[in-house]
Image (cartoon, grey):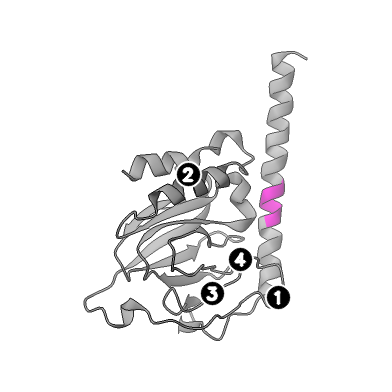
Protein backbone atom coordinates (compact mmCIF):
# COMPACT_ATOMS: atom_id res chain seq x y z
CA UNK A 1 0.00 0.00 0.00
CA UNK A 2 1.41 3.40 -0.96
CA UNK A 3 1.48 6.39 1.35
CA UNK A 4 -1.14 8.09 -0.82
CA UNK A 5 -3.50 5.12 -0.54
CA UNK A 6 -2.96 4.96 3.23
CA UNK A 7 -3.70 8.66 3.61
CA UNK A 8 -6.88 8.35 1.52
CA UNK A 9 -8.14 5.44 3.65
CA UNK A 10 -7.23 7.27 6.86
CA UNK A 11 -9.12 10.38 5.74
CA UNK A 12 -12.24 8.38 4.83
CA UNK A 13 -12.22 6.56 8.18
CA UNK A 14 -11.82 9.85 10.08
CA UNK A 15 -14.77 11.39 8.22
CA UNK A 16 -16.91 8.35 8.98
CA UNK A 17 -16.07 8.63 12.70
CA UNK A 18 -16.96 12.33 12.70
CA UNK A 19 -20.27 11.61 10.94
CA UNK A 20 -21.15 8.85 13.41
CA UNK A 21 -20.36 11.13 16.36
CA UNK A 22 -22.63 13.87 14.99
CA UNK A 23 -25.47 11.39 14.43
CA UNK A 24 -25.04 10.05 17.97
CA UNK A 25 -25.22 13.59 19.33
CA UNK A 26 -28.41 14.36 17.43
CA UNK A 27 -30.05 11.09 18.50
CA UNK A 28 -28.99 11.68 22.11
CA UNK A 29 -30.63 15.08 22.08
CA UNK A 30 -33.85 13.67 20.63
CA UNK A 31 -33.89 10.85 23.19
CA UNK A 32 -33.17 13.27 26.01
CA UNK A 33 -36.16 15.40 25.03
CA UNK A 34 -38.51 12.45 25.56
CA UNK A 35 -36.95 10.49 28.40
CA UNK A 36 -35.05 12.80 30.73
CA UNK A 37 -36.84 14.76 33.41
CA UNK A 38 -35.17 17.40 35.57
CA UNK A 39 -34.71 16.63 39.24
CA UNK A 40 -36.90 18.33 41.78
CA UNK A 41 -33.71 20.03 42.91
CA UNK A 42 -33.67 22.00 39.66
CA UNK A 43 -35.22 25.45 40.07
CA UNK A 44 -36.49 27.33 37.05
CA UNK A 45 -35.08 30.83 36.79
CA UNK A 46 -36.72 31.82 33.52
CA UNK A 47 -39.16 29.46 31.79
CA UNK A 48 -39.26 31.50 28.58
CA UNK A 49 -35.47 31.27 28.15
CA UNK A 50 -35.35 27.66 29.34
CA UNK A 51 -32.79 28.48 32.02
CA UNK A 52 -32.33 25.88 34.74
CA UNK A 53 -30.31 26.28 37.90
CA UNK A 54 -28.98 23.52 40.08
CA UNK A 55 -28.56 23.82 43.79
CA UNK A 56 -25.00 24.83 44.75
CA UNK A 57 -22.39 22.28 43.75
CA UNK A 58 -22.04 19.79 46.58
CA UNK A 59 -25.77 19.40 47.09
CA UNK A 60 -26.94 17.65 43.97
CA UNK A 61 -25.34 14.62 42.40
CA UNK A 62 -26.38 14.02 38.79
CA UNK A 63 -25.62 10.64 37.23
CA UNK A 64 -23.42 10.95 34.15
CA UNK A 65 -25.25 8.67 31.71
CA UNK A 66 -28.35 10.44 30.33
CA UNK A 67 -29.45 7.42 28.28
CA UNK A 68 -30.69 5.45 31.29
CA UNK A 69 -34.05 6.15 32.87
CA UNK A 70 -34.07 7.79 36.30
CA UNK A 71 -30.45 8.85 36.07
CA UNK A 72 -30.91 11.97 38.21
CA UNK A 73 -29.80 10.83 41.65
CA UNK A 74 -29.98 13.20 44.60
CA UNK A 75 -27.57 12.47 47.43
CA UNK A 76 -27.72 13.77 50.98
CA UNK A 77 -27.20 17.49 51.02
CA UNK A 78 -24.14 19.00 52.65
CA UNK A 79 -23.55 22.57 53.72
CA UNK A 80 -22.09 24.84 51.08
CA UNK A 81 -19.60 27.56 51.96
CA UNK A 82 -21.48 29.75 49.50
CA UNK A 83 -24.35 30.01 52.00
CA UNK A 84 -22.22 32.00 54.43
CA UNK A 85 -19.86 33.81 52.05
CA UNK A 86 -20.52 37.50 51.51
CA UNK A 87 -19.99 39.49 48.35
CA UNK A 88 -21.06 39.41 44.73
CA UNK A 89 -20.69 36.14 42.82
CA UNK A 90 -20.30 36.20 39.05
CA UNK A 91 -22.06 34.01 36.50
CA UNK A 92 -19.80 33.20 33.53
CA UNK A 93 -20.86 31.89 30.11
CA UNK A 94 -19.65 28.72 28.38
CA UNK A 95 -21.18 27.81 25.03
CA UNK A 96 -21.51 24.31 23.55
CA UNK A 97 -20.80 24.53 19.82
CA UNK A 98 -20.54 22.27 16.79
CA UNK A 99 -18.00 24.65 15.24
CA UNK A 100 -15.98 27.69 16.23
CA UNK A 101 -12.73 29.40 15.34
CA UNK A 102 -10.89 26.90 17.56
CA UNK A 103 -12.28 23.81 15.83
CA UNK A 104 -15.19 21.37 15.68
CA UNK A 105 -17.18 20.18 18.71
CA UNK A 106 -15.95 22.61 21.35
CA UNK A 107 -16.84 24.40 24.53
CA UNK A 108 -16.16 28.12 24.26
CA UNK A 109 -14.21 29.12 26.18
CA UNK A 110 -12.65 25.69 26.74
CA UNK A 111 -10.64 27.00 29.69
CA UNK A 112 -12.10 29.35 32.26
CA UNK A 113 -10.81 30.64 35.60
CA UNK A 114 -13.41 31.62 38.20
CA UNK A 115 -13.60 32.49 41.89
CA UNK A 116 -15.03 30.34 44.66
CA UNK A 117 -18.85 30.33 44.55
CA UNK A 118 -18.97 31.84 41.06
CA UNK A 119 -21.29 30.06 38.64
CA UNK A 120 -21.10 28.98 35.01
CA UNK A 121 -24.07 29.07 32.65
CA UNK A 122 -23.56 26.22 30.20
CA UNK A 123 -25.49 27.21 27.06
CA UNK A 124 -26.30 24.51 24.50
CA UNK A 125 -26.11 26.73 21.41
CA UNK A 126 -26.10 23.72 19.06
CA UNK A 127 -28.29 20.72 19.85
CA UNK A 128 -27.00 17.37 21.10
CA UNK A 129 -24.48 18.48 23.74
CA UNK A 130 -24.13 18.20 27.49
CA UNK A 131 -21.46 19.16 30.01
CA UNK A 132 -20.59 16.55 32.61
CA UNK A 133 -17.80 16.03 35.11
CA UNK A 134 -14.87 13.79 34.20
CA UNK A 135 -12.61 14.68 37.15
CA UNK A 136 -12.84 17.21 39.96
CA UNK A 137 -11.36 18.19 43.34
CA UNK A 138 -11.99 16.00 46.37
CA UNK A 139 -15.16 17.04 48.14
CA UNK A 140 -16.91 18.34 45.03
CA UNK A 141 -19.99 16.75 43.52
CA UNK A 142 -20.23 15.78 39.82
CA UNK A 143 -22.49 17.84 37.59
CA UNK A 144 -24.34 17.09 34.36
CA UNK A 145 -26.36 19.62 32.35
CA UNK A 146 -28.54 16.80 30.97
CA UNK A 147 -28.93 18.40 27.50
CA UNK A 148 -30.81 21.40 28.89
CA UNK A 149 -30.71 24.60 26.83
CA UNK A 150 -29.16 26.57 29.70
CA UNK A 151 -27.92 25.24 33.04
CA UNK A 152 -26.21 27.27 35.75
CA UNK A 153 -23.78 25.42 38.02
CA UNK A 154 -22.29 27.03 41.11
CA UNK A 155 -18.80 25.88 42.18
CA UNK A 156 -18.08 25.83 45.91
CA UNK A 157 -14.97 23.59 45.93
CA UNK A 158 -11.60 25.01 44.86
CA UNK A 159 -9.42 23.25 42.32
CA UNK A 160 -9.34 22.05 38.72
CA UNK A 161 -12.31 20.44 36.96
CA UNK A 162 -12.22 18.44 33.73
CA UNK A 163 -15.59 18.04 32.00
CA UNK A 164 -16.79 16.67 28.68
CA UNK A 165 -19.67 16.39 26.24
CA UNK A 166 -20.51 12.68 26.51
CA UNK A 167 -21.55 12.06 22.87
CA UNK A 168 -18.49 13.89 21.51
CA UNK A 169 -15.79 12.99 24.03
CA UNK A 170 -14.01 10.89 21.42
CA UNK A 171 -13.71 14.10 19.38
CA UNK A 172 -12.05 15.81 22.38
CA UNK A 173 -15.09 17.97 23.21
CA UNK A 174 -14.08 18.85 26.74
CA UNK A 175 -13.08 21.78 28.91
CA UNK A 176 -11.14 22.75 32.03
CA UNK A 177 -12.33 24.96 34.88
CA UNK A 178 -10.01 26.46 37.49
CA UNK A 179 -11.83 27.47 40.65
CA UNK A 180 -9.57 29.79 42.68
CA UNK A 181 -6.49 27.53 42.72
CA UNK A 182 -4.85 24.38 41.33
CA UNK A 183 -4.59 22.22 44.46
CA UNK A 184 -5.27 19.00 42.48
CA UNK A 185 -2.73 19.70 39.74
CA UNK A 186 -1.10 16.25 39.65
CA UNK A 187 -4.45 14.49 39.67
CA UNK A 188 -5.64 16.56 36.72
CA UNK A 189 -2.56 15.76 34.64
CA UNK A 190 -3.30 12.06 35.08
CA UNK A 191 -7.01 12.46 34.31
CA UNK A 192 -6.29 14.42 31.12
CA UNK A 193 -3.94 11.66 30.00
CA UNK A 194 -6.69 9.07 30.56
CA UNK A 195 -9.23 11.23 28.72
CA UNK A 196 -6.98 11.71 25.69
CA UNK A 197 -6.33 7.98 25.44
CA UNK A 198 -9.95 7.64 24.30
CA UNK A 199 -9.91 10.48 21.75
CA UNK A 200 -10.30 9.00 18.26
CA UNK A 201 -9.46 11.99 16.06
CA UNK A 202 -5.68 12.40 15.72
CA UNK A 203 -5.86 16.12 14.92
CA UNK A 204 -7.37 16.91 18.36
CA UNK A 205 -5.76 14.10 20.37
CA UNK A 206 -3.83 16.51 22.59
CA UNK A 207 -6.43 19.29 22.74
CA UNK A 208 -6.85 19.09 26.54
CA UNK A 209 -3.17 18.69 27.41
CA UNK A 210 -2.36 21.62 25.11
CA UNK A 211 -5.04 23.67 26.87
CA UNK A 212 -3.72 22.63 30.25
CA UNK A 213 -0.10 23.49 29.44
CA UNK A 214 -1.05 26.85 27.94
CA UNK A 215 -3.20 28.08 30.84
CA UNK A 216 -2.04 26.37 34.02
CA UNK A 217 1.37 26.94 35.57
Q: Earlier in the sequence, mark 1 or mark 2?
A: 1
Relative height, residue 62 to residue 129 (above, below): below
What's the CA distance linking mark 3 and mark 1?
A: 19 Å
* Closest to the observer, 158 or 122: 158
* Residue 213 spot, x, y in % from top left: 38, 40
Task: Assess whether mark 2 and mark 1 are in contact (beta carbons under 8 angstroms).
Answer: no
Image quadrant where residue 93 sits: bottom left
Q: Is 35 positioned to the left or the right of 99 in the image?
A: right
What's the CA distance linking mark 2 and mark 4?
A: 20 Å
Q: Is the magenta region chiefly helix, strand or loop? A: helix
- Which region is colored magenta? 20-24
Q: Earlier in the sequence, mark 3 or mark 1?
A: 1
The structure residue drawn at horizontal position 46% and vertical position 52%, both measured from the top left corner, is 175
Task: Assess whether mark 4 and mark 2 are in contact (beta carbons under 8 angstroms).
Answer: no
Numbered circle sitting on residue 61: 3
Q: Which residue is mark 4?
A: 64
Amino acid sequence: MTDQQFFRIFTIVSLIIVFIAIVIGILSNIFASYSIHPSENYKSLNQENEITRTAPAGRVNLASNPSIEQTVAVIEERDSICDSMEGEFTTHEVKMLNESGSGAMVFEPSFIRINTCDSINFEMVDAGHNAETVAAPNGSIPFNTMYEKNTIIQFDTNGLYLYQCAPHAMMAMAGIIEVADTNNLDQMKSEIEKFESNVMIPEVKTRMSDLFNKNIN
